[in-house]
Amino acid sequence: MPQIFNRSANVLSKVSIVGGLLLVGGLLGLVMLLGRSSYVTRANEFIEQPIQFSHLHHVGDDGIDCRYCHTSVETSTFAGIPPTKTCMNCHSQIWANSPFLEPVRASFRDDKPLRWIRVHDLPDFVYFNHSIHVKKGMGCESCHGRVDQMPLIEQANSLQMDWCLNCHRNPEQFVRPRSEIFTMGYRPAVSQAVLGPQLVKEYQIQPSTTCSTCHR
Amino acid sequence: MAEALDHPHDPLAGMSTDGLRTPAVIAPGHDFNSVTDKIAGIVLTKRTPIGWFFGFAIAFAFLLLLNLTIGKLLLEGIGIWGNNVPVGWAFDIINFVWWIGIGHAGTLISAILLLFRQQWRTSINRFAEAMTLFAVACAAMFPLLHTGRPWLAIYWLFPYPNSMTLWPQFRSPLIWDVFAVSTYGTVSLLFWFTGLVPDLATLRDRAESPVARKIFGVFALGWRGSARHWHRYEMAYLLLAGISTPLVLSVHTIVSFDFAVSVLPGWHATIFPPYFVAGAIYSGFAMVMTLAVPLRKFYHLEDFITMRHIHNMTKVMLVTGMIVAYGYVNEAFFAWYSANPYEGYMMLNRMTGPYAVFYWSLILINALMIQLFWFRRVRDNVALLFVLSLFVNVGMWLERFIIIVTSLHRDFLPSSWDIYTPTRWDFAMFTGTIGLFLSLFFLFIRFLPALAMFEMRTIVPEAKLQGDHH
């Protein structure tokens, strides 16, 4: 009887066993990597805004405090998006005729708010409260990154659940003195390994990791 | 020849000493060639019987209904089903348990009967194993689809390092179920495929179409039938049988834990694991009977699936059915003996409540009707056995319905009592999986040898004449 398969089929069959395992494993790994990639999380991605507002300029160059615009960060779940009036506090005086700022002036004239695009958009099934984090010594920078270096604001972290849990399980690695909350580029005066546990104790940080902490 | 067959420990012993009382596992007059010709002929024939197309068309129509139902389910959600508080589990788990149970006969036949050297398993093991696989496939649909959006449910079902650092609840029997069923499916598939390899090689060698030769050749994995191949094959098959054997008991035990681990009257019972396993084997043999009777009739396989097989399957059904019936008695006894008002009411509600007609139907089928199997005249009547096996399938489905629905619909709080009614989509999904099951089975008997040719060859007298006694 003639051979059905060529001699190469022997090699092919052996390769296909290993290759099949590698292919399946590789595909699974790829899917898992993709799920964590910035393609899915949209981290490190500039988002087009109605006005290309630069945090680099306002925070980095001018040294404006976070709370000048995000007024409710210490008292509310929501840090707050400033009304056009806040912009006009300065821009009625400086760059008052800049064509670049015409949308701001238009918003002020017509009494229509600027429609900023939310960059840090948690899913609706997640409850998050800014005030408690600020109160317990969590710096803005820890979650939002070096805002003072961002010409356009971008999401610095994945905002995925394992990222949240990483801090909720190990707050001593991230906590800072309350006086340094709004500092950008903070470096602890003494080692974080010493300071962290001290602050956790002092601020009585008991981060809950039960489901209903965030999924209420 | 007679001497060889009269050996007292030879499973073929009955053939010559007492031919009338105990029919042989293979009709007389067959040799190596006739067995192979007959079984391979079903697959390699160029003319598919018209009846096959007819049967497949009906099964396929129901498979399309399943597709429609799944489409509707994914678009609209599980609200299309009738289950709702307080009956949060209904057709989805009834059908899951029913299908998983049916699968058990295949594993029992292929693994346990192999280890016990029951030669009568040889002609029914292949299609019983296929039945197991298809039943597991149907069963798996229900837990997957009852999540509504299965692609999001992966992290509920399987432990893997996900971006939420979330793991399933390892203390829940539902996750044990995932492991039990996936292990069961995997081992069954390996076992079935390993057993197929020598036969695939036979088909490869006999096929005339070059495409068929290639396809059979790929799956035959280069089998040449050398002594080394056989040695390895026997070893692998025995090991797989050893691995499968505990699964016959463990899988349905764990399925029963889904109920027994809860604290609901009617579920929270220590009798559940053995009672479920017996019920699984009972319903599984009923399904093997349901499939075997038409299979041997339409393909004229009476020589291979003999009255011996029919009798033995009936006897297994009788034994396991009696264990199940004992389970019913036990449930009723403990409802009274516990002196617990909730347990007592649960039983009273089963017997006299809104679903009483289903309860008494299942008692009628699973406890009373099977007593017919004691009679030789019933065991000889193949057509009647076919009908009775259908009733057993129904009876075992009703058992799961009663256990699940009557316990849930009236629990501790009378204010939350309600009546469960399945919707048309519940029935569409259920009949759809039957369509899937039968479609797969029709394809199986058309494209693969439904009986293990090489194993059948070991039970023809020709094999014995060579003095091979293992």
Image: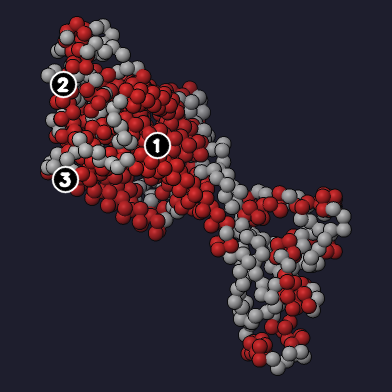
To which residue does mark 3 refer? B53
* Numbered label attached to residue B185: 1
Q: Give how far across and how far down residue B139 sits, in percent.
A: 37, 40
Give the image quarter of residue B314: top left
Q: Give how far across and how far down residue A94 sits, in percent.
A: 76, 89
Q: Secondary structure at mark 2?
A: loop
Q: Secondary structure at mark 3?
A: helix
Give me the residue at 81% from left, 63% from top: A186
Q: Disc 2 to disc 3, how far (Cα)? A: 31 Å
* Numbered label attached to residue B89: none
Q: Give how far across and how far down residue B196 sits, in percent.
A: 30, 32
Query: Tag 2: residue type?
Result: Asp
Name the one closer to the observer, A78 or B182: B182
Name the one closer to the observer, A75 or A105: A105
Give me the residue at 61% from left, 81% from top: A50
Query: Tag 3: residue type?
Result: Phe
| Mark 1 or 2: the one toward you | 2
Q: Are marks 2 and 3 in contact (CB under 8 Å)?
A: no
* Crowd tier of the residue under label 3, counting other residues whose Cα lies within 10 Å: few below 14, some 14–19, many 20 or above: few
Labels 3, 1: one chain:
yes
Name the one closer to the observer, B93 or B199: B199
To which residue does mark 2 refer? B31
Regarding residue A73, the answer to whether it shows in the image is yes
Labels 1, 2: one chain:
yes
* Crowd tier of the residue under label 1, counting other residues whose Cα lies within 10 Å: few below 14, some 14–19, many 20 or above: many
Q: Secondary structure at mark 1?
A: helix
Marked residue chain, label 2: B
Q: Looking at the rendering, in which quadrant would you find the C terminus of chain A? A: bottom right
Marked residue chain, label 1: B
Q: Give how far across and how far down residue A133 sits, in percent.
A: 74, 60
Q: Disc 3 to disc 1, how far (Cα)? A: 28 Å
